Image (cartoon, rainbow, N blue to C red):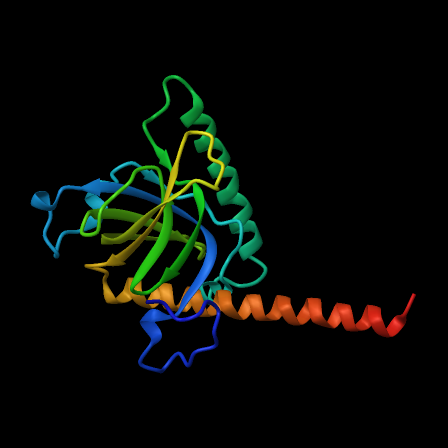
């Protein structure tokens, strides 16, 4: 059971791994047969052709050493590379690269909720590739286990039905878990800043009157 989303939680408390946030991230997945994996497997082997697009937004804590003057040029250069790769992928003779698409998720350091195209049962193993919007992007490859799967009939999807699927991480490395926690707290701070900004604008508009 997850705690309420975006609830302020002490990063040093015992519940750090259960802190969660809703966001839109690059995520892709593979269904894995249980007899071909073990808990020490590296999930990266299930994603040999992943291309990591440079993020549209950057988590600045990861880029302090880069320098504020150089960073925009690095981001611009990498996005131009992204465009060239996408053009190549779209050609008939393109290299077989996989560009991970964005989707709505709810993520914590212990698991994730995401939408997938196939139904699944509790216990089903799924390998995930999760890309966090650091600079450079952080690619996380994690083996997971399905905890629940619910058909979403009320969500329009061009290719058919989506299933809201909850998974728990079963072999996440400690450094990847820390990256997720750092990302979640940064995202929560950004959301709080945006709420304060909107609240201040409403108060200013009210005080100024018509």
Q: Residue furthest right?
A: 210
Seen in the picture, residue 126 relative to 169 is either above or below; the reply is above
Q: Is residue 165 left or right of residue 124?
A: right
Seen in the picture, residue 143 relative to 29 is either above or below; the reply is below
Image position, residue 109 (x, y; %): 32, 65
Tell me which residue sits at (52%, 38%) in the image.
80
Location of the C terminus by quadrant is bottom right
Seen in the picture, residue 169 relative to 124 is either above or below; the reply is below
Q: Residue furthest top?
A: 92
Tell me which residue sits at (34%, 57%) in the image.
112
Image position, residue 202 (x, y; %): 76, 68
Location of the N terminus by quadrant is bottom left
172 or 105, which is in the foreground?
105
Image position, residue 205 (x, y; %): 83, 68
Tell me which residue sits at (49%, 65%) in the image.
187
| Quadrant of the image occupied by residue 89 | top left
177 or 74, which is in the foreground?
177
| Quadrant of the image occupied by residue 86 | top left
Tell me which residue sits at (54%, 56%) in the image.
71
Q: Is residue 201 left or right of residue 146?
A: right
Image position, residue 119 (x, y; %): 28, 40
155 or 107, which is in the foreground?
155
Q: Give the number of marks.
A: 0
């Amino acid at each position: 059971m997850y705690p309420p989303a975006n609830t302020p939680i002490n990063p040093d408390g015992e519940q750090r791994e259960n802190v969660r946030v809703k966001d839109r991230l690059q995520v892709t997945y593979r269904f894995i047969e249980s007899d071909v994996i073990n808990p020490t497997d590296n999930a990266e082997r299930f994603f040999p052709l992943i291309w990591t697009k440079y993020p549209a937004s950057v988590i600045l804590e990861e880029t302090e050493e880069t320098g504020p003057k150089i960073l925009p040029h690095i981001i611009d250069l990498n996005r131009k590379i992204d465009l060239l790769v996408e053009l190549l992928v779209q050609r008939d003779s393109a290299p077989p690269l996989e560009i991970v698409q964005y989707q709505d998720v709810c993520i914590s350091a212990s698991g994730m909720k995401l939408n997938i195209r196939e139904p699944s049962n509790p216990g089903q193993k799924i390998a995930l590739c999760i890309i966090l919007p650091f600079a450079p992007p952080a690619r996380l490859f994690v083996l997971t286990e399905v905890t629940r799967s619910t058909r979403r009939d009320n969500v329009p999807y061009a290719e058919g039905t989506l299933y809201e699927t909850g998974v728990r991480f079963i072999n996440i490395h400690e450094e990847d878990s820390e990256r997720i926690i750092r990302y979640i707290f940064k995202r929560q701070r950004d959301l709080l800043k945006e709420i304060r900004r909107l609240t201040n604008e409403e108060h200013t508009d009210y005080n100024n009157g018509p």
